[in-house]
Structures are given as structure tokens and as C-alpha cells.
Image (cartoon, rainbow, N blue to C red):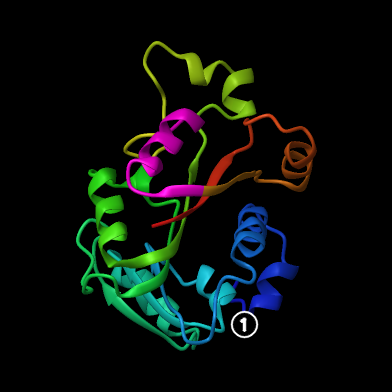
Amino acid sequence: MVLESQADWLKNPSPHYWRFKRYQELLGGLIKKTDRVLDVGCGEGHLLFLLSEANKYGVDIEKTYLARAKAKNLQARFKPASAEDLPFKNSFFDLVCCTEVIEHINRPKQCLREVQRVLKPGGYCLFSTYNHFNIFNILTLKAFSSEPRITPGHMREYSWISFKKLVQNYFEIIKITQAGSSQLVDGFFQVVKLPLADFMIVLAVK
């Protein structure tokens, strides 16, 4: 399903809906029309719907995804590139988003170094990743397997401790939240502040 606007995306609950709702809450009020914003691992461009007021850039290693993103008339500039080697000069962006990327790549630290490099001093960055120690993995004991089982397509998975430590090596964390993959799970963990939802989300500053 191709969604034509930010409003359409936010009116169509899906497993992704609750994460994007958190992104919108965190980024609300931070972005000015003159800001340059980069979405690393932009995929088909869904997050760029939320960045409609900014000068938008998107990179992804998959050219098929970029073609689909371009077809959506997002008024963004797209480049095929790896998250570990961003094709931009130093201190170029006011905001960099890197959502659900670090679990898929070989060198996550290099990715964060690149985000740090292209981000302006005082600029914001948004990271998210899958929570290996979510409620489902704990109840099914998957999180405690002697041979850790991770989601197909993931190179690694993080706990809250390891995720925060990774980000804090390069940035100052200013906000932490989480999101579920359904209304029930998301709503529960917005009320019960246990770090057991499906996805971990961090807003940080350089």
C-alpha cells in the first residue's frame, strides 16, 4: 500500500505505526524549514513523510527501495550509500535519523561515527533498534537461549544497556522511549514503564 501523505501514514495502524508515532512525538518542534535532515537506511521513504517541512535527504544501500521512495514524490534527495560510508561533508546536517539500521550492518560503531561526522555541533540524532529482551522473547525464553537466536536479517540484537552504551559513546542522550508492534503492547508499555517493548528509541545530541 502506497501512502500519499504523513496524515495517511498515521491513520493506517500497522506493525510500524507505533514506532512512527514515537518518532513524531520526539521530533515534533525540533525541525525548521531551513534544516537539512538525513534519513540513513531510508528504505521506501516512510519516515520522510514525518519530515515534510525540512530539506530532506535519504540514503539506502538497496536501490530498489530508493526507486520506490523516489516514486512517492517526497521532495527529497536520494543517494545509494552504505550507513558506514555516508557521501556527505562534515557537519552538514541538523538532524540525522537512523532507525532500525544498526542491527542489520556489520560495523554499527562505524555507522555512528559517520552520523557523528555529518551532524552539525548541537544537531540531533534519532536512533531505534529491536529490543532482544522484549516481553515476547522473555516469556518464550528466546532471550536466554544458550545459543542466542536473533531475527532473520539481523547481524546482532541489543539490550537497553548495550544500546544506550553504544549511543553514549558518540552522543549525549536526551530522551529515551520505546514502542510496541501492536496497540495493546505499545499502550501497555507506555503506562507500565518496564523496558520490555519491541523497539528501543533514543533521541540524542552531538
Q: Is residue 162 magenta?
A: yes
Magenta-highlighted residues: 158-173
* Residue 92: quarter of image: bottom left
Secondary structure state at the residue bearing disc 1: loop
Q: Is residue 67 magenta?
A: no
- Name the residue at 60% across, 60% down: 23
Give the quadrant of the N terminus.
Answer: bottom right
- Name the residue at 26% across, 44% down: 109
| Label 1 crowd bin: few (<14), some (14–19), many (20+), radius 10 Å | few
Q: Which residue is mark 1?
A: 4
Q: In the current view of this chain or complex, which residue is farthest to the top?
A: 146
Please indicate, yes or no, whether residue 68 appears anywhere in the rendered image: yes
Disc 1 residue type (three-letter): Glu
Residue 154 spot, x, y in % from top left = 37, 40
Give the quadrant of the C terminus.
Answer: bottom left
**Left of 120 or right of it: where is 106?**
left
* Residue 137: quarter of image: top right
- Name the residue at 57% across, 76% down: 49
Residue 114 spot, x, y in % from top left = 25, 58
Please indicate, yes or no, whether residue 46 appears anywhere in the rendered image: no
